[in-house]
Image (spheres, rainbow, N blue to C red):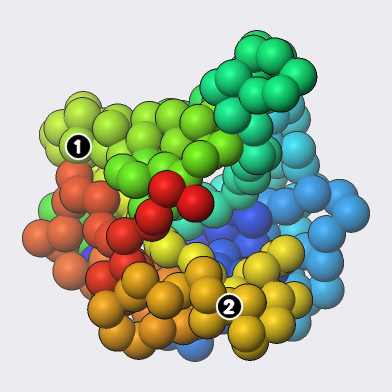
Amino acid sequence: MQIDGKGAVIVGGASGMARASAELLRERGASIAILDLPTSAGEEVATGLGGSFHPVDVTDEEAVETALSDAVQALGGLHIAVNTAGGGIGKRTLGRDGPHPLADFRRVIELNLIATFNLNRLQAHHMSKNEPDDDERGVIIDTASIAAFEGQIGQVAYSASKAGIAGMTLTMARDLGSFGIRVVTIAPSLFSTGITSGLTSEFAEVLTKDAAFPKRMGRPEEYGRLAVAIVENPMLNGSTIRLDAGQRFAPK
């Protein structure tokens, strides 16, 4: 899909990998709408990109539907969606205090997996209304993690939620193929965003020692460059692409 002149919704776009994606898409001529928490820097980021900001908690089903509709109206149509909002906790299946609290597990699944699917189904609905561009109506990019494939000790809830995102990618691409909508998931390793951006270089080296090359954390713009490549290449569909420098997580 040609990026110039298209409307892009970036969920989690106030910072990190999503912000880098928004900036690169804007450089290529896309109009940008940022969805992020009300407490985020979303307004500032959106203004800097000449776009619009729509504050929302992605776990609030009705609020997401309203915010997304407002974003699409501001854009004049939705062609590209990049979804990175999420989070995790560190708790074992069985710890010193007993079994993993079920409420905590549900909360992570709700934040990462269910919120992503809710965004996807609504984004696809808006995209289906587009006139085709070389047979394409839209591109949805979701975010998993290499923890979906080799989660570390204490990541059981996070791994399950991210594995769910990876698992639904091909099925969703098949569901949406007749509409000309592609779905691709990016599975990053450790990236210098959020809490990890404050790590010392020594600690970062320890965390990335198992990478093949380069032995460092990923940079947000490297995620953004892959997102742009996915949008521009129509043969990328239904896959989860590892963005990990050849790293495989050790048990801990």
Residue 179 occupies which quadrant of the picture?
top left
Residue in the foreground of this view, choosing between 104 and 67: 104
* Image location of residue 167, percent across then percent down: 28, 32
Residue 105 occupies which quadrant of the picture?
top right
Q: Secondary structure at mark 1?
A: helix
Residue 120 occupies which quadrant of the picture?
top left
Residue 158 visible somewhere in the drawing: no
Q: CA distance from mark 2 to mark 1?
A: 33 Å
Residue 245 visible somewhere in the drawing: yes
Q: Looking at numbered disc 1 in the image, what kind of residue is underneath it? A: Leu
Residue 44 lies left or right of residue 252; in this view the side is right
Residue 11 lies left or right of residue 97; in this view the side is left
Q: Looking at numbered disc 2 in the image, what kind of residue is underneath it? A: Ala
Residue in the foreground of this view, choosing between 185 and 55: 185
Of the 4 image quadrants, the one containing the N terminus is: bottom left
The image shows residue 190, relative to residue 185, as above or below, that is below
* Image location of residue 235, percent across then percent down: 10, 60
* Image location of residue 89, percent across then percent down: 67, 39
- Check the image and name the residue furthest to the front: 96
Mark 2 and mark 1 lie on one chain; the one further toward the N terminus is 1
Q: Which residue is mark 2?
A: 204
The image shows residue 91, relative to residue 137, as above or below, that is above
The image shows residue 163, relative to residue 196, as above or below, that is above
Q: Which residue is mark 1?
A: 170
* Image location of residue 137, percent across then percent down: 28, 50
* Disc 2 packing (10 Å; few <14; some 14–19; many ≥20): some
Q: Which residue occupies 54% across, 53% down?
A: 84
Q: Nearer the viewer, mark 2 or mark 1?
A: 2
